[in-house]
Amino acid sequence: MKPLIRKLTLTLTLLLFFSVFAFSATESIPAQDHSIIREAILHNYVTPIEPKKLETITPENLENLLDENSYYLSAQQMKELVEGFQGAFEGVGIYIFRENGDVIVSETIPDSPAFEAGILARDRIVAVDGMPTAPLSLDQVVRRIKGPKGSTVVLGIRRSGQEEIIEFEITRQSIQVSSVDAQIIEEEIGYLEVRQFNEDTTRTTKKILEDFQEAGISKLVIDLRNNPGGLLNEGISFSRLLIPPGPITHVLYREGEITYSSFNDDLPYETAVVLVNEGTASAAEIFAAAFKERANGIIIGQPTYGKGSVQRLYPLPSGGGFKLTEAAYFSPFKRAIDGEGIYPDIDLQRFHPSIQLEDIKPLGGERRLSLQDEGEDVLAAQQRLQLLGYAIEDPEGIFGSSTQTAVANFQRSQGIFSYGVLDFSTQRRLNRAFQQWLIAPEQDLQLKTAVNYLKGQRSSHENAKPVKIN
């Protein structure tokens, strides 16, 4: 792919998916904030609450009364939230979702601490710093994973098909995430990845589409995978760039319904495909639903998360903030999205079935590996080397001569001393090379299917059964 445009954007979000801040039930909320919080809940919370239940404003009381997407933020947490939507945050760098009660990694952010540690897509997070994740909400799990730069967190990971729990001690770092990324995939096909709907997303996207048209791009892949949402107005403005005239979404508040519509008769692209997965939520689902129902577009990937609620963020006198669920939104055809999600027309995993991530053993750098060594860490290295294209004939888990040759060849490819010993530095490089290989377009079956569809080719998964939106 040829890089075209990369843009970092700034926002303060109203539609949030993975909230990243916590308050302790033992903390207190400054008295100067109480009246605003109380009035906001009484007049705007999506479900009416009796005034007498709000006589005491404490984190514990709010947690008991409100949904998991509504909570108080301290002044420091509010500051971090604003900084986070400037494209930077402090954490380990993973996208997660919940499936059948499990907390699952959807994707790691390239070059993040989790990426470098070897966390893989589909890994199950069973504990955070020894705390089991099973009884926690997804929101609570994310709050525990996030933390200041330089601090550490221990993630207990179970890979599918493996009984043992692998512990990864990861040092949190500052992570930069751009909001919109654009590339030219093929001569006539543009790729637009929207990672979040920020206040600059529509403006940036409009410029990208203009650049695409000048470059002769006539078809478009819109990637909303792991897009957790963002500003409601930005999601709607973005939709107006690509959705024909008519309803985009219906937002139901306590006082009534608001319908947001498109009025665009001059659509730049009539041939487009949208990619979604379990991490696609909120404002991203608004666009995906409108694209499916109003633009008759093809959606490829996995069913979306299903978060159909709208939050407002209230700045407070103390410098803190209060996030409150105030509405639910529905598709153009008034189908519920909350708890349901959007089902793709072509339902398939990101990776080819031959790539069984659940079988990949962790390579943790606990010892140097050399000739005649045995163990699961040897197998982990062999798995990575083989997927990277190095031939190994030794039995699984045994560091024989062909494994030694593969290691030496890998070291040579990395421009480091080639001596066939898996020292700690080589193990880190091998983990990184494997992660880079894993996220490359060549392994992205969903993207390949989208490109083949746009090129008019028959997909290798053309028999994948289309599923209708709920």
Image (cartoon, rainbow, N blue to C red):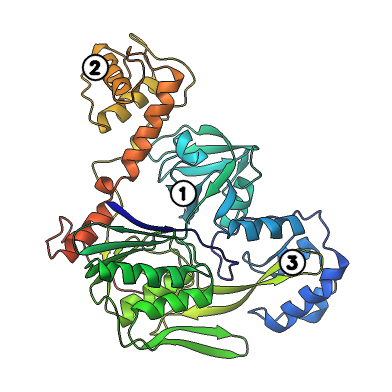
Local packing at callout 2 (Cα closer than 10 Å; few below 14, some 14-19, many 20+) is some
| C-alpha span from label 1 to label 3 | 28 Å
Local packing at callout 3 (Cα closer than 10 Å; few below 14, some 14-19, many 20+) is many
Q: Which quadrant of the view contains residue 409?
A: top left
Residue designated by label 3: 62
- Mark 2 or 1, nearer chain start: 1
Q: Which quadrant of the view contains residue 170?
A: top right
Residue at image coords 27%, 71%: 213
Q: Is residue 165 left or right of residue 409?
A: right
- Mark 1 or 3, nearer chain start: 3
**In this orientation, does residue 352 appear?**
no
Residue 394's tag is: 2
Rendered location of residue 265, percent (x, y):
31, 88
**In this orientation, does residue 394 appear?**
yes
Residue designated by label 1: 104
Residue 335's tag is: none
Rendered location of residue 459, percent (x, y):
15, 59
Q: Is residue 171 left or right of residue 363?
A: right
| C-alpha span from label 3 to label 2 | 59 Å
Residue at image coords 43%, 44%: 110
Residue 380 drawn above or below residue 419: below
Q: Amino acid at mark 3?
A: Leu
Residue at image coords 40%, 77%: 239
Residue 197 drawn above or below residue 403: below
